[in-house]
Amino acid sequence: MKSPFAPLSFDDVIAGRSGDRCCSITNCWPTARWLLAFVWLTVGCAAMVAADESNEESFDFFETRIRPVLVDHCYECHAADSDELGGSLRLDVKEGWMIGGDSGPAITPGDPAASELMAAIRYESSEMPPSGKLPDHVVRDFEKWIRDGAADPRLMDDDEHLTRSQHQAFDWDQARQFWAFQPPRSSASPVAFGSDSAIDAFVQKRLDAEGLTATPIAPPSVRLRRLAFDLTGLPPDPKTLRQFQADPSDAHWRRLVDCYLASPQFAEHWARHWMDVARYADSNGSDFNATHHDAWRYRDYLVRSFADDMPIDRMIREQIAGDLMPASSDEDRRDKLVATTFLMIGTKMLSERNKTKLRMDVVDEQLDTVGRAFLGMTFGCARCHDHKFDPITTRDYYAMAGIFRSTRTLHGESQQYVSTWKKTPLPISKEHEQSIRKHEQSLQGLDREIKEVESELKILVEKTELEGITIDDVDAVREGHWVESTYKSGFVGKGYVHDENRNKGEASIRFAAVLPNAGRYELRVHYNASGNRASNLPVSVQLNDETHDLILDQTMPPKTGTYSVLKEFDCDAETQALVTLSNRGTDGYVIADAVQWVQIDGKTDQDDSAAEIERTIAMRTTLTQTLKQLKSQRADLVANAPPPVPTAMALADLPIDEQEDCPIHIRGEVSNLGDIVPRGIPQVFSESTTAFEPLEESGRLELAQWLTDPDHPLTARVSVNRIWMHLMGEGLVRTVDNFGIRGEKPTHPELLDALTIDFVRNGWRQKRLIRNIVCSDAYSRSMVSDDDPRVSLDPENRWRGRAVRRRIPAEAIRDAMLVAAGTLDPSGRENLMDSYATLVSQNNANSKATTKFGLDDPKRTIYLPLIRSEVPPLLANLDAADPDLLVGKRPTTNVPVQALTLIGSPEVHRWVMLTTKRMMKETTDDTQRVRWACAVLFSRDPRPVDEQILHAWLESDVAKAMSSDEERYLEWIAAMFASTEFRFLD
């Protein structure tokens, strides 16, 4: 049967063959055939007028200058054999560019300026080819070719048909008949659905229909290990294992299920499942790996939500529009704001120069996330053209895009051209708010005082500017060991230096100057005095070729201000003056502050000037001490500041005057706009209006309410299917992120609908659904070997007659090793990215983020930083979710590199060592050690082969050559860590 969404061929349109499609071109435009014939005649005549196609010269130009470029740069996406025809445009035949694609004819012969192809290769519209702009001379060749009439000998064969995707029409009535767009249907269950056997009844019904027999219930140890990892992501403790082995009754099983569901470990483990879908990360990744300082709040929101068994529909509403929902308290308001981090946390090309394009790229990422996460639909395909398979039109896409386009995600720049987001303040208590206000007022008061003192000091410095020529210590040449200091006030410039009263004879400092005028000069040496200073500081004064050796007693206070006059000298013009202070033979600390040369010829007011300088310096000293005290007070105030206002990566609506419906972007291009589409939902979901009317805000709240409407055909189904998949290995719909035409249909449609109806009827509560599933026999089935006949009858286990081997998630494998080592810290962690600046790394090949908390940290893996592009190899090799992507179902591989990673990782080696030490401490012989290791690592009793393996290893030459028993047992434990049994359930 031909798909209701298959495109009409061009010949179909000409002939009017559209069947009963309600949206066919002949129904919409009765004169379509006449119009198309007219277009053919017009375009054909124009081409013939513009170019003489029999002109060999024109064809030669095309063959030598144009066709090779089309083949090399365009045929990959615009030819009959392209995987997907870009923009519905073919460029491998003349008729292709004449009829054109989504935007109409690509070439107007004779008029390059009116030709879409020229705009594209000039990078004025769609920027083609995308790999890079064509050279200027090639662009000029295309311009000449089109101006001369676009001669093109590549005509279609008579039996070839040209199709155009823009003529695709959906039969909406038929589209809505697809199973996923139909509301869940109640079906007669063999037993009441509230009972444990309801799931088994549906499964058994299908097994009977397929002629299959279910496997028996798995042994208690297998069931318990499966349950513990599925619900908590941690292995069962040996005590619980022994108790359940002794009493594997249904009542005991239910108690264990309830215990696990009530544990904080359940909330952490299932929050991690949601984080896969939320593409959670603590950095942006992409071109600018900016730090997500507040992402951890969203992680903790998820943990709290699963711990409290928050209804899934409420979680969805809060994560899409929590900022627009009413709140019952400050705590509730905080949670609702933090929840919207879901739409903020995706990777973004922050340095994109075209901010209009960036805005739409962010909208596209958000829309695609909402579609796949909650509806199992791939909306992103409809950005450029109607969806190729599902009944989602470009108009539908931009109806929803307008909602997120009216929402503020990015705001401002972290540096030039690099966009960022605005941190949203979260509500705080009145007491906290008052303490912050009081602290800010105190800080402002101190800042005013500091500014006033600094202003007075500046005036005094200008007033006492040293006359003559002054050489400060920072301008002098030092040799040997000198220590900079500002400890004692009253100094020139920013401070002084001292020799630390050691390394005598090795330190000197030279003050050089040129004395420009002839005359008598006074040599002043600046220092601060004390009893521990040198009393015999040698001062060498070299004036051109003359040298004078002087002695300065620094135990005596300066005679004037901060200096003492050592001597007066008669100097010629341009005298080269060099003053050297040395600690050779000195008997105390040597202080070097500054040297000053002052010409004193004819001055009579030196005494008055010196007195004034001394008074001013005293005032400076007092103010300097005051400034030091004020800055110390400020530092104490800052150190004891109240906690800052917490912030979140939260959405917000744009101002009302900036909210608007979105125009269709033809071919997805931000500069090629079409009709404006009212904000709303896809047409396939409504037989009446699809627009949100009236609309007073962005439309996110209306979208959230529509998604979680109890009659919505997809949202609850998708949630139920994911929960089933996490517990059973495969979803009832195996393509968990795709419920569309290309996705798989449910293996047990009646069971999926029954679970969905019960889920919604009981308040969208996840724990109840999980309890029903894990208490079914279908969950507890045993595995069988590959040669069992049941495997050949149902190789993919679609009918759920047996259990299948499932890999433990990467995070749970790491956490299980921490449990074995006895080092797991069950507490959480906040503010884990505080040590990072704007970037987690410098965005080059040699730069890596240096995380404060690595794999060797004792916290659960969910509480470690997750840096995009730098996922630890241990987790990546064990198939951890890629934080760049929405991952509804993780890939499951079993390859040698996983065992090698577990063997070679330094963190794993440390956990092996700690596990070995713990085992040696708690056991006394090999029998006990085998039992201990099997219980802790494999959650089962030992088998004869386990002890045989250990004994064979201990008797090997390699083991005997080792220096200690601990080393030998360490290698045995390491092998168990790297084993498939450790990584897999069952």
Image (cartoon, rainbow, N blue to C red):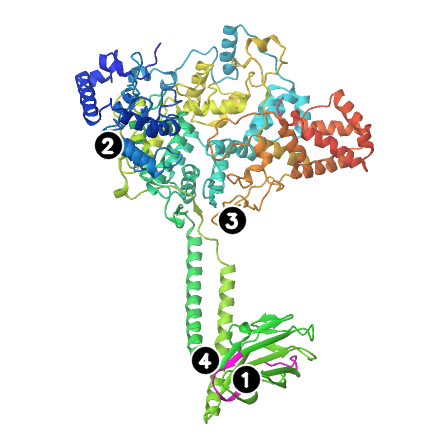
Vertical placement of 53 versus 586: above or below? above
- Badge 4 or badge 3: first in the primary sequence: 4
Vertical placement of 621 versus 636: above or below? below
- For label 2, the crowd category at 10 Å Cα-Cα, with few meaning under 14, some 14 to 19 and many 20 or more, is some
- For label 4, the crowd category at 10 Å Cα-Cα, with few meaning under 14, some 14 to 19 and many 20 or more, is few
**Residue 817 percent location from the top left of the image:** 65, 34
Q: Which residue is disc 2 drawn over?
A: 147
- For the residue labelled by badge 1, is the local secondary structure a helix, a strand or a loop? strand
**Residue 28 percent location from the top left of the image:** 20, 19
Vertical placement of 856 versus 173: above or below? below
**Residue 744 percent location from the top left of the image:** 44, 17
Q: Which residue is disc 3 drawn over?
A: 836
**In the image, residue 523 lies in the stretch drawn in magenta:** yes
**Residue 397 percent location from the top left of the image:** 32, 29
Q: Which residue is disc 1 drawn over?
A: 524
Determine whether label 4 and label 2 are within 8 Å by CB: no
Which span is picked out in magenta? 513-535
**In the image, residue 670 lies in the stretch drawn in magenta:** no
- Badge 2 or badge 1: first in the primary sequence: 2
129 on left or right of 225: left
Quarter assignment of residue 930: top right
